[in-house]
Amino acid sequence: MEELLNLPKKEFIKVNLKWIKEVNGGKLMDTLPLKCPLALWVAHNGAKCSRELVPNTAACPLCGAPMCPDCGNHHVETISRVTGYLSTVSGWNESKKQEFADRHRYDLEGNR
Ligand SMILES: [Zn+2]
Ligand SMILES: [Zn+2]
């Protein structure tokens, strides 16, 4: 695992995707977001995020959890500042995004 963590991010993801495809039957990794291999890679390599808030998350290609599109950080606390609660994969479905959009609209109306 140590050796794998020293791979460039792209290669690391590729190796894990291969594992998903060949060993896990194409299913995403069923793991806690912070234990996801990609999250571990980010922690190991000290990838720093320049963003305070991540309004739009990307889905991790390995575990499906929300992550920062820039650095791959799975740090859901950062995301929770946007959504107001600790996010789960299902928490980032369409209705959640809509709720966030609605809340934003409500704030705008409140300022009128
Ligand atoms: Zn980031
Ligand atoms: Zn992940």
Image (cartoon, grey):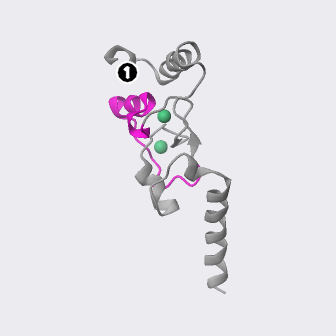
For residue 33, what is the image quadrant?
Answer: top left
Decide which of 43, 36 is in the foreground and name it.
36
| Percent position of residue 72, x then y | 49, 37
Is 101 on the left or on the right of 45, as rendered? right
Q: Is residue 87 above or below residue 60?
A: below
Count of labels in the image: 1
Residue kind at label 1, given as amino acid type? Leu
Q: Position of residue 50 (x, y in %)?
A: 45, 47
Question: What residue sits 39% from the left and 39% below the top?
Answer: 34
Q: Is residue 67 above or below residue 40?
A: below
The magenta region covers 32-56
Q: In the rendered view, does 97 fall on the left or right side of 68? A: right
Looking at the image, which residue sits at the far bottom? 112
Compared to residue 37, the image places residue 74 above or below, namely below
Quadrant housing the C terminus: bottom right
Horizontal placement of 38 versus 107: left or right?
left
Query: For mark 1, does the 10 Å Cα neighbourhood hold few (<14), some (14 to 19), or many (20 or more) residues?
Result: some
Residue at image point 43% right, 32% down? 36
Q: Is residue 80 above or below residue 34?
A: below
| The N terminus sits in image quarter | top left
Q: Is 60 within the magenta? A: no
| Mark 1 residue element | helix
Indicate the position of residue 91 as horizontal and vertical percent values: 56, 53
> Where is mark 1, residue-wise?
5
Residue 98: give x, y in percent of width and height.
67, 61
Residue that appears at 46% across and 57% down:
80
Q: Is mark 1 within 8 Å of ligand 2?
A: no
